[in-house]
Structure formats: structure tokens, C-alpha cells
Image (tube, grey):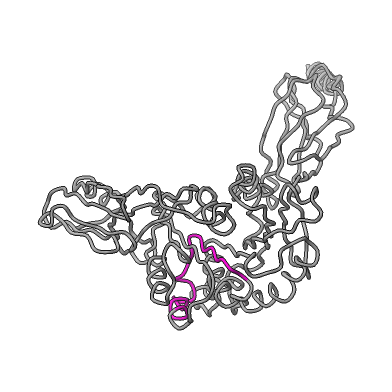
Amino acid sequence: MKKIIFIVIFALFFIIGCSSLRVEKQSEVKNLRVEEGIKKIKLTWDTIKDKRVAKIEIKRNYDDFRKYFKRIRELSPNENSIEIEHPAYLLMEYKVSLKYKDGTESKGKSITATAKHDSVFLDEVDGRKMEIYLPPSYKKDKSKRYPVIYMHDGQSMFTTTYLGNNWEIDKIMDRLIAKDKVEESIVVAIYNRNRAEEYIPYEDKQQQKYGNFKKSKSKELGDFIEKKLIPYIDGKYRTIPTKENRAVVGCSTAGLYSLWEGINYSNLFSMIVSVSPSYELGNDKIFEEMKNTPKKNVKIWIDVGTSEWDPKPRKMIKILLSKGYVYGKDLFYYEVKDGEHFSTSWKERIEYPILLFKGKKLERKVVEIKPEVEVGVSSRTNELSEMVNPVAILDDGVKYSLLGSAEYFSLDNKAGNIDKWGNFKFLQNKDFEIEVKYGNIKKKIKIEKKEINNEEKRLGIRR
């Protein structure tokens, strides 16, 4: 009996072993190759002959550190190529695997790829990387020279940036130029290294606690830009090498730096663009420096979104006004309703300072004002601001806040009042109207008590 059982077990193992030997190995795509195009790539491979294959899966590496691949497309087994949009100059890894009818999937074949750009090119000075945007006529008209816009945080300025975290400045410039709204200009996007050390021009103990700040290198960066980077750009590219034809742009921490750089190196730039600036970094020392610095021959743009609300840009505007800057002429401020501290918001308004820098319309006039009611709480100071923000719309499309240059009148002084900066206050538990006047333009806006209460509640304000 034992002998029979042994023979049966042996036979079963033999049958199972033989059947496993008969299982065919999973195949892979063969001869995987890549063609690099303008902001796209094309993957090709030999036609799949394995009849067991149900689909071809295309994945892309979305994390250089963890090698995380995300599926971007599925194809039928008879297809042997695919075109994919790809950020220019960004090296990414693609994996092509085969999905079988039995539900299994092959290990996959990988290939790395990058794409080209038709108007943005990589460059470098002393190890400092840059991306350079050249306008449409640059290659055609060899005699023409161009203004230059210098932008900090250069890794995120163009459509070369990964995961959509970019300003799309190349698209914005192309659009403004095509509409003949702005002079053709070169854009130099300067890569950062250590953002905190380079963009905070003062000692900052709080940043030191985070471990990414030993000492400020803002002066070193400013000297490098003045003595090496700008001379290199003026020497290699057909620029107009004058202060009047240079602007500097930065956002967030780089927004702080751009104001500091533009003022301290005012011999280099005629326009400063400070987007959603982090003026609190460096223990608010930028305010003291601006108070003690005479007016410079520069035009300044500062903006902030109400969803990231910070009252300090308003404070900076008041300091600059006290130094002699003229609002609406060489000083502009824009409060963006629902604007966030992110590139998706910044790229929606960056064209306004670009137009102020080199717009084709030399004389502008306000054609409309749109008063907006705003309620904001600073995430940094917890300060509550309730105000009317009259947005001026110019005849070339530029928008900016009128702030202290408009006149405000409460139409019911018993119900509520408003100061010269647009800050309003309820005196009774009821709505009241405000009239905003700028030149010959007048607009009324209703301040609704219930709406303000709801907004305060949403922001977590208790009275």
C-alpha cells in the first residue's frame, strides 16, 4: 500500500513539473528606441508577435529618487510606436511592458529620454545653469538687439519644468509678441542652488534651525550676476546692454531677493518685479533697509494673492511711497483676489509687469475700475484685513490695485466707514455702500454684513 501511495505522489510531482516546464517565458518588447522632438518624444519598438499579449503598457518615472513609475498610456498589441508630450531638457525614464491575457505582466524594458525646445536653450556660466528664451525673430534678424528679463528660480520658468510646476514664460512671451503687445525680449532664467542662503540677504536664525542656512550668500550672487553673468549674456547674445533694457523678477523668497538686488544693484536694472514676496525672512530687515535707502531710478512691481494673504507687501508699498516713488508711474501693487502662493497663480498675472517693462503702449490710461471686497488673515501674523480693493484696468490690459491712489466714500457713515487705504469697518450690524472714485471714474460696491461674517467664519475668525 505504501508503495502504491509513493508511486502516485511521485507521478503527481512529475506531471506538475512537466507542465511547469511547458509554460512559456514572458516575452518583452524588442529593439526599444526613442526619437527626441520639440517638447515631445517618440517611442518605437518591433511589432509584437506573441499572441498571448493583451495590451502594451507605457509608464514614466515620476520620482527620480524612488523610481516610481506611473502609467501614462495603454496600447493594443499590434501598435509599435507612440508620441508623448515631454518637458524639454528634463531627463525621464520610460518603461514599456506587456500585459498578458492571463492577467500577468512582463518586467518591462526601460529607456531614458529628454526632449528639445524650439525657443529655450540651456547655457551655463561658471557652473551656474541657466535657461535662455530667445524671441521668434532672433534667428531671422541677425542685426536686431533685445532687452533682457532676468528671472530667479530658473528651474521653474519655462515649459521645461516637470509636473506642470512652471510659469510657462515661453508661452506667455510668444503670445504677447504674437499680439504685438510687447517688445521681443530675451529671458534669462537663472537656476538657484541653496534658495535660503542665496535669496535671503540677511542673517536668519529661524532658517538656521531648519539646517539649510549657514550664512547669507545674496551679496555673492549679486556680485556674480553683475560681474560675470550679465557680461556673459551681453557678450554671447544680441542684447541691448543698458540698465533701461534689463528687468529682474523673483517670487516668494526670490521676490524678497529681487527687491533687494534691484535696489542694491540699481545700476543694472530699470525694473524690479517682486511676486508674492516673503519679506518676513531675515527678521523683517528688508523694511529697515528700504526706509534707509534713498529712492532709486527704478520701476517696482509688487503683488500678493488674497488666498496667501500677507499684509507686509502693503507695508512695503507705504515705505516706498514715503521715499518718493510715484504710485502708478514707477510703483505698482496688485492684490489678486483668490491668488495663491503657487506658479499656477503667478503665471496668470506675470504679463502685467512684463507689459509695464517693455509693452508697446508707452502711454497708458485707466479705462475701468473693478472694486473687490476682500477678507484675509495672514498665515504668518494672524492679522485680519478687511478691505475694498479697486482694481484698475488699463487700455493695454494691465491690471493693478489703486490702493491709496483712489478715493473712498462711505454712503452711510453710521453703518460703516472706510479709510484712505480701503480698510472698512462696520459700525452697525447692517450692510452699507461704498463709492470708489478714481479720476472721472466712479463705482459703488455693497459691503454685506452676512457675507463678511460667513467669510470670517470660513477663515476661523472669532469675535
The image quadrant where one finds the C terminus is bottom left
Counting from the top left corner in percent of width and height, residue 75 is at 73, 24
Residue located at (80% from left, 49% from top): 139
Residue located at (45% from left, 62% from top): 332
Q: Is residue 271 above or below residue 57?
A: below
Viewer-side residue, 461 vs 177: 177
The part of the image, by quadrant, that contains residue 164 is: top right
The span picked out in magenta is 269-290
> How many numbered tags mark residues here?
0
Determine if the magenta segment contains residue 335.
Answer: no
Counting from the top left corner in percent of width and height, residue 11 is at 83, 18
Quick check: 423 left or right of 225? Answer: left
Quick check: 350 left or right of 394? Answer: right
Viewer-side residue, 48 vs 242: 242
Q: Is residue 257 above or below residue 32?
A: below
Viewer-side residue, 29 vs 116: 116
Determine if the magenta segment contains residue 276.
Answer: yes
The part of the image, by quadrant, that contains residue 72 is: top right
Counting from the top left corner in percent of width and height, residue 108 is at 79, 34
Residue located at (66% from left, 38% from top): 70
Q: Residue furthest bottom?
A: 292
